[in-house]
Amino acid sequence: MEQVFVKDRLRLLLDHFGEVGDPREPAKVKYPLPEVLFLVTCASIAGCDDYDEIADWGAHQIEFLRGYSEFHFGTPKEDWLRVVLNRIDPALFEACFTAWATALRPDGADLIALDGKTLRRSGDSAAGSKPLHLVSAWASTQRLVLCQEAVDTKENECAAILAILGRLAVKGALVTIDAIATNPAVAEAITGAGGNYVLALKRNQPTLHDEVVRYFDDPASAGLDSVEIVDKDHGRIETRCYTVSHDVAWLQGDRRYPGEPRFHALKSLIRTTTRTEWRGKVTEETRYFLSSAALAPQRAAEAIRSHWGIESLHWVLDVVFKEDQSRLRRGHGAQNMALVRRLAFNIVRAGRGKRSIKTARKAAGWNPQFLAQLIAPPSR
């Protein structure tokens, strides 16, 4: 069953917006920053994807907005929105977002996926700036964006992952990350914070990868605990086999002292084999993972399979929220608006009911009552 958080999203949202520092001189503030952020968030929920749409929506929905805050001078124009979003400190805004998302799930997330995404049109070749790369933390079970961190290139993704792990509560959670973060520093950061990791193992760790491949291919390893899962959908048959070994002491590698672990806190090796039958063709893929938890095959399958939910998030942001089409390139606008999209995604995702996210956004734009239900769900 799909889990939906029903806390007072509006109260929490406005409280946390009030914590974001306003870069403007107080005497010159015509539009209070919490009202601006509330406007931008509501408009993004309602299907607006750039500043001119947000400004126009705000002008037409001023009575709706005044039901939640004063908006004494009405709503700002497009150019004014651009200036303010460019100036807001993204670190403060991200801290606000993380605190808000965490408050919605006080019981914590049991599965957390971390992955990066590049905003392809956010670079400016004339100015010599590269496209912005964002790493997001995703609560896989709750399907909720928890955190965001920006870096200048994909090659620096590990730095963003370490920054997220430094401020995100991962105690008791199983954290899944792709092979780019399969290194002892990331592993130690996760276990040091009280969590456990499941890290993909690919050829960027050639020695370790080849050792694990040979181990699973050895006939002596036959009979390891495994589970097989079959999915059938529209003529496509996918059979996935998850095999787990807790025998890790044999791993070789350079060690500073006898008995030093080959990889920090390593307790499980995992192999997944996926066989896909589709339109008369059969393909097979084998992947390997490391984990600091002594996982049963079923739990390993759950963690690895759920990681792809963050890929679904990225698809929704590109296709439904048109993130890849955004040409924001100056100041902090691209980073801050990316966070607004994730904030809007969380709210729409939680209250959409049986609608798709695309349809729910349109419905919020058509019907202010539905938008009100999204941002402030009725108490149960």
Image (cartoon, rainbow, N blue to C red):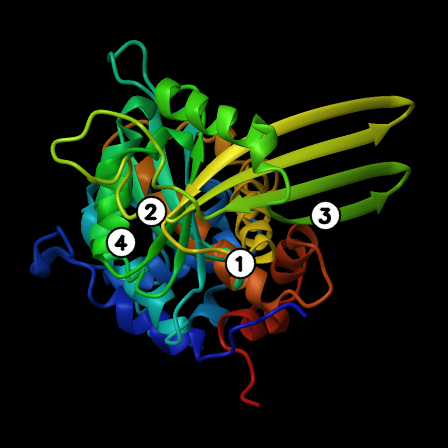
Q: Name the element at disc 2.
A: strand
Does residue 309 appear in this view? Answer: yes
- Quadrant of image for the C terminus: bottom right
Left or right: residue 69 versus residue 216 is: left
Q: Name the element at disc 3.
A: strand
Image position, residue 305 (x, y; %): 59, 47
Q: Which residue is mark 3?
A: 228
Q: Nearer the viewer, residue 44 or 64?
A: 44
- Quadrant of image for the N terminus: bottom right
Q: Name the element at disc 1.
A: loop
Q: Which residue is mark 1?
A: 143
Q: Nearer the viewer, residue 217 or 270?
A: 217
Marks 1 and 3, Cα distance to the nearest angstrom? 25 Å
Q: Give the mark, 2 or 4, whose residue is nearer the N terminus.
A: 2
Q: Which residue is mark 2?
A: 148
- What residue is shown at x 27% (from left), y 68% (from top)? 16
How dense is the environment of label 3, judged by Cα within 10 Å: few (below 14), some, or many (20 and up)? some
Image position, residue 374 (x, y; %): 55, 70
